[in-house]
Image (tube, grey):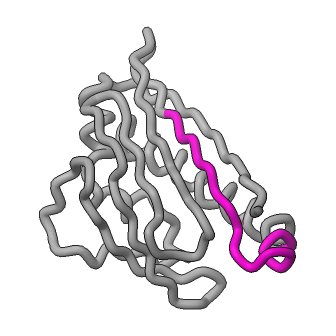
Amino acid sequence: MAETFHLERAQLVARPRAEVFAFFADPTNLERITPGFLRFRITTPRPIEMQPGTVIDYRLRLYGVPVKWRSRIESFKPERSFTDVQLVGPYRRWRHRHEFVEVAAGTEVRDLVEYEMPLGPIGALAQRWFVVRSLDRIFDFRRRAVAEILQG
């Protein structure tokens, strides 16, 4: 059985929850908050309506290798949360829950990711040597991009 890894991040955005949720619920904004080194592109025809069951296809590059990623929206609760799961992609399993909590200063955006690596012991080594740092770099970029876009 593969080991499950967790990534948790939280960010305060000084904007109303409805506005912050609307930004994240528009899949085209994912391209804006993903670092350029991934060459991330949505390939699903637009517009994309977010709801349970929506499937979204992407292309990206991981360490220079072209990767296709397909995700499905598992749950969608307007202004509160949504969860996407990987159907096709580089991980054995990837589940990303996005939560939006109204707080006095605006909205707390929470990312809760559970993932498993493929390839047994080789995947475990990759997790320790590359994946943790790459995910930190991606989510650090995302934090900066969200702050810049939503808060100027």
Image x and y of residue 96, in percent: 50, 49
Q: Which residues are magenta?
A: 110-125
Instruction: Say if 124 sits above or below 78 in the image.
Output: below
Residue positioned most to the left: 47
Residue at the image point whose x is 69% and y is 47% from the top: 6
Q: Answer left or right for 79 relative to 140.
A: left
Residue at the image point whose x is 68% and y is 62% from the top: 116
- Quadrant that contains the N terminus: bottom right
Q: Answer left or right for 56 relative to 107.
A: left
Residue at the image point whose x is 28% and y is 78% from the top: 43
Indicate the quadrant where residue 80 lies.
Answer: top left
Image x and y of residue 22, in percent: 24, 39
Instruction: Say if 106 sits above or below 111 in the image.
Output: above
Image x and y of residue 31, in percent: 37, 65
- Quadrant that contains the C terminus: top left
Q: Answer left or right for 121 relative to 142.
A: right
Instruction: Say if 39 sits above or below 85 in the image.
Output: below
In front here: 98 or 4?
4
Image x and y of residue 78, in percent: 25, 32
Indicate the quadrant where residue 112 lies.
Answer: top right
Q: Answer left or right for 53 relative to 116.
A: left
Residue positioned most to the top: 104
Residue 24 lies in the magenta-colored region: no
